[in-house]
Image: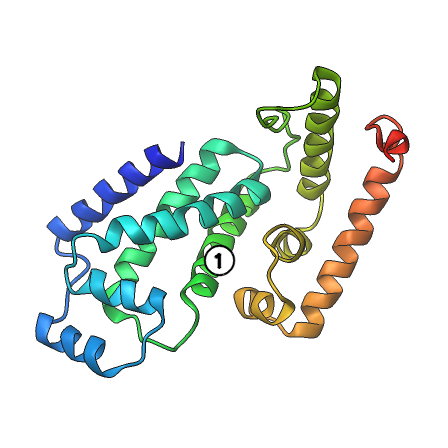
Amino acid sequence: MVEAITRRTERGAVRQELLGRPIRPSFQAMSNVLDTEPLDEDDRLVALYAAGDGAAPRILTARFLPLAFRLAMRMLANRAEAEDVAQEAMLRLFRAAPGWRPGQAKLSTWHYRVTANLCTDRLRKRPMLPLDEAAEVADGAPSAEQGLTQAARHAALARALDGLPERQRTAVVLRHIEGLQNPEIAEIMGVGVEAVESLVARGKRGLTAVLADQRAALGYDHDG
């Protein structure tokens, strides 16, 4: 699945270049940046992409496409929409590369913010929908019964997340699923750290309330 999005994204980047976008700075100017600025690895990749390096698009896509798809899938609970968002987020990264200023922000933070905003735009344009399909069960599940229980838990969590207000959902996903720290989440969401703490706390309370009556049905009461 990710490989298919990667191919579409890279073809999209090529089409953008054929249309004249991104407009690359001179190679000498970019070489000067690479030679004189202490760049981290992500900034260096963006600079190489803007300078026309042939390997940079694939490396950037392999690094940032899964991040975008994972976040979009959690926020949208719809695989097709998540794939579209992940591809659009990558194309925006490619378009932004020529004007990227090293050190202005972490590239991953910028990419999370773009992805979250794309998801929010889609959520605002559609009614709240229930999750129709349970999450896939990983290969090697101990038993069919345990696999079904695990799938039910994933589906219940996805439905509960889908029922949260969008800002609480974003904060909870970034904190407890993506594992980001509150200051970075604050930068992604454009709010203060205290606001993030409040959103996460309210989101967790909302999830707990929704899932509380389902513990027995989901098999939690039988866990050790």
Residue 185 sits above or below residue 33 on the image? above
Mark 1 surroundings within 10 Å by alpha-carbon count, few (fewer than 14), some (14 through 19), many (20 or more): many
Residues 169 and 2: in front is 2
Residue 127 sits above or below residue 108 on the image? above
Residue 33 sits above or below residue 7 on the image? below
Give the labeled residue for mark 1. Answer: 112
Residue sitting at 41 percent across and 45 percent down? 86
Residues 105 and 123: in front is 105
Identify the secondary structure beneath mark 1: helix
Extreme residue in the top direction: 144
Residue sitting at 35 percent across and 47 percent down? 62
Residue 10 drawn at (x, y percent): 25, 44
Color scheme of the displayed model: rainbow
Residue 167 drawn at (x, y percent): 64, 56
Residue 165 sits above or below residue 199 on the image? above
Q: Is residue 33 left or right of residue 197?
A: left
Q: Is residue 196 left or right of residue 88?
A: right
Residue sitting at 13 percent across and 77 percent down? 29
Give amino acid for label 1.
Tyr
Residues 193 and 148: in front is 148
Rendering quarter of residue 40: bottom left
User: Which quarter of the rendered picture does the C terminus lie within?
Assistant: top right
Residue sitting at 68 percent across and 26 percent down? 151
Rendering quarter of residue 95: bottom left
Residue 16 drawn at (x, y percent): 19, 50
Count the labels in the image.
Answer: 1
Q: Is residue 212 left or right of residue 9?
A: right
Extreme residue in the bottom direction: 36
Residue 120 drawn at (x, y percent): 54, 51
Q: Is residue 119 left or right of residue 211?
A: left
User: Which quarter of the rendered picture does the N terminus lie within?
Assistant: top left
